[in-house]
Amino acid sequence: MRDAIKKNRTFFLGYVICLAIGLVIPGVVTSTFAMNTIVLSLIWSIMGIGWNFIGGYAGQISNGHALYYAIGAYTVAICADSFDLSPWLSMWLGMAISALIAFLLGKPLLRLGGAYFLIATMAVAECARVIFLNMPALGGATGVMFLDKVHSPWYSLQFPDKSTFFYLLLVIVALLVLLAKYLDKSKFGYYLRAIKANEVSAQSAGINTPKYKMLAYILSAMIVSLAGSLYAPFVTYVDPYTLLPLDKSTMICLVAVMGGIGTVAGPILGAFVMTFISEYARAIFSSYSGLNMLVYGIIVIFIVLYIPNGLISVFSKAKLGQRLKKALARSKGGVR
Amino acid sequence: MDSILQIVEATKSFGGLVANSGITFDVPRHSIVGIVGPNGAGKTTLFNSLSGVHPLTSGKVIFDGTDITRAKAYDICAMGMGRTFQIPQSLNEMTVWENVLVACLCKHKMGQARERADQVLEEMGLYDFRDAPAGTLNVVQKKRLEIARAVATDPKLLLLDETMAGLTGIERKEASQLIRQLNQKGITILMIEHVMEIVMNVSDKVVVLNGGKLLMEGTPEEVSVDEEVISAYLGGTTW
Amino acid sequence: MLLVQTIWEGIVNGSILAMIAMGIALVWGVMGILSFSQGEFMMLGMFITYYLNEYLGLDPILCVPIVGVIMFGLGCLIYRSIIAKALRGPRLSQRLITFAIGMVLTYGALMVFGGQYRTVQNLAFTGSIDLGFMTISKQKLVPLVIALVMVAFMYVFLNLTRAGKAIKAISQDKDAAELVGINSNVTYMVAFGLSSALAGIAGCAITYYYPVYYTAGAAFLLFGFIAVLLGGVGSTAGALVGGIIMGLTDTISGVYLNTAYKYLAVCVIFMLIVTFKPKGLFGK
């Protein structure tokens, strides 16, 4: 453990600083709107971290992860509404259902590569939206309301003050970051990167590529499902329009890409920046409907054009440059 | 003699195109076997069939007593057959060390794999490039990395696909020395090579393919005086 | 006789999809970008037609060349200012850029044109032709004819003109095409411009029977993508057939199954075709 910390000093330093900032946020931030935005950013962070495994590490660009977000949210909502079940339990059920569906869908989908996978996942999410819209058992177009006034907030996860929920999310994100950091330098992480880099080559190095792609897909589905399970009690209702709009899946992908795919911190950075832009644009331009999304779109274009490797690369660019220079100098030296 | 690899009536066709037909030969354990033949003779196709990239249409491949005709590439690798690609398939966005590490993970746990990766890089003379992205290597270095990655899977049998093409005379000598060293460590080697002088020098046995068929097999001496072989090569390549 | 009627409607919807699919296939084939903004180009075509019709009384048929020219110009502009730069970046970023362009266009349209549904009022052809076993609505016949003319135009353009041949050459082998002196940058721009013009004209044609609103194009994007995969990337004939298959699946399953399950039907057809014909029906 001490060894691991020593090796990743920068990471753990940043980790502790972020946690420390997190601890004081509810004391410093007084505006409900800002607190809301921070909570949403944390939920988007979870989605980004989840998507990053299949899209960022394994390089299989899913454009349908809103499906798992919806499964997580709906499971919590229906369990609370019909069975009085606490999200503490139903979030696990949601993850289990997501894992199962990911497994069943993953079999045919993951055999498709590149754009085919992207379009197929997109089609599946569209199917899901239509099914959610038309299933009376799932509340149809009106969805499910489950405002809980009976149980204690720690049971229903519906806290009257945002700060308790914020701390809860902070702990969950912190744990997920540790998981991501661990997997980043594990056999799993290296295998996924190898699959992304070159699938044929990865197989010849003994990597069971279908198995690892499936594992990454299931893991990412479960984490995104968890995000949905936490979002549902925060807003106390679920419906197909807010959970599964056409562009939701692309937004999940966007958060990770804006931050920097295939990195631990990237999705979180991306989630915060993109959520703040979208929420504050909405508030500032509230009198012109559409202007907020227009601004959002323009900012995305600029980030993608000028920081193609994600916002995180701004911090590590200097390091990368050094590495490249060294390598070039060596190969010029004529060592064979 | 004990064979590590037996190829029986290997046939591979892509749609109507027959790339290999009825190829049968053995690879004796601990030997170095060279495969030669003009361009389009079906050498690389045969490698792809052996290593599970494109399984045979008909026929059999028996590796170390197990039928691997329909086995997947990753399972074949785990059983102890490593291979290189004619066009290096390095994982360009990853560092040289990570490239080798990934291969080491086939047989080792993470901790051991890290050490083993450094060891392999040292042996292959790639340690100086440890942290460079594989995409920045030149062709010669990439070919070396290709061998390093195959060796890192701790193979019993190593398939080398034209690892010498494009090398200068001195580099070739180094490379053939490397092959001998690997062989002395107990690794059986099956190599495709265009550079005749090396095949003849290094191999215990030579297999000649032409037009997807086995033309002949024998010792380098036998092959080099065979008239059919000579005529197959006339107007052909480096002889 | 419901079936015949349904098939007819399916073919009409399919022909519109075919135009969008051809545009997607063009950009994909030439520069390898999966363009997410195609639906929004279509939506813009719809609005341009609406305003030409509303203020100048031009029938959508007469709007086709105007929309084509405007959208071609806009496509070239977007290529020059954004796409050309994005081509240097990672592939995923290129896709997201087209997604963001779509977003800007959608919400720009919402701000400029407002969020209400509109219909084009002044149509030259209305009413229907009764064939006894089925009725052909003229409002659907016109879009079909426009689509078929566009498909024919694209076929002639790609196979007989210099610029079209350059586009074909680049999508087959970029390096070789550059070696024989084809300027890939100009060709890319023309391809992108053409694809947005195609989508715009699809939008123009569909105003004959479809309402105009700012998110109208988004629904066509996914079906357009799937049509391209069905037909095989980079094949004009494939895009036509793929579009018609999608239109038929959509309409037939909408009539005979619950509308809710037409997406499922589409998914199933898609999975079947990519499983058994991974390169599409016309792919090489």
Image (tube, coloured by chain):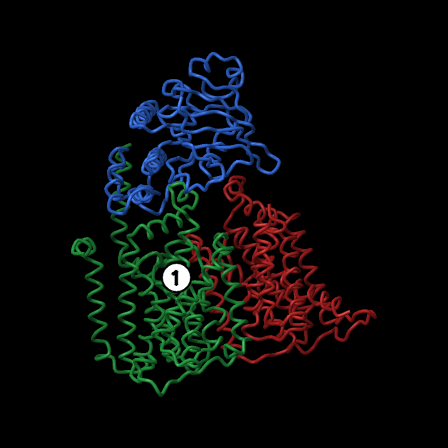
Number of numbered labels in the structure image: 1
Q: Mark 1 is on which residue type?
A: Ser
Question: Considering depth in this image, is A109 or B74 the residue closer to the camera?
Answer: B74
Q: Chain of mark 1?
A: A
**Chain identifier of the blue chain:** B
Instruction: Decide which of C6, B27 is in the foreground and name it.
Output: B27
Q: In the picture, residue C169 is in which quadrant? A: top right
Query: With C45 as the anchor, is B186 left or right in this view?
Result: left
Q: What shade has chain C been given?
A: red
Q: Quadrant of the C terminus of chain C?
A: top right
- Residue that lies at the very extreme toward the bottom in this rendered image: A149
Q: Residues within 10 Å of mark 1 (few under 14, many from 20)?
A: many
State the residue position of label 1. Answer: A220
Q: Secondary structure at mark 1?
A: helix
Where's the N terminus of chain C, which quadrant? bottom right
Q: Which chain is green?
A: A
Q: Nearer the viewer, residue A196 or A305?
A: A196
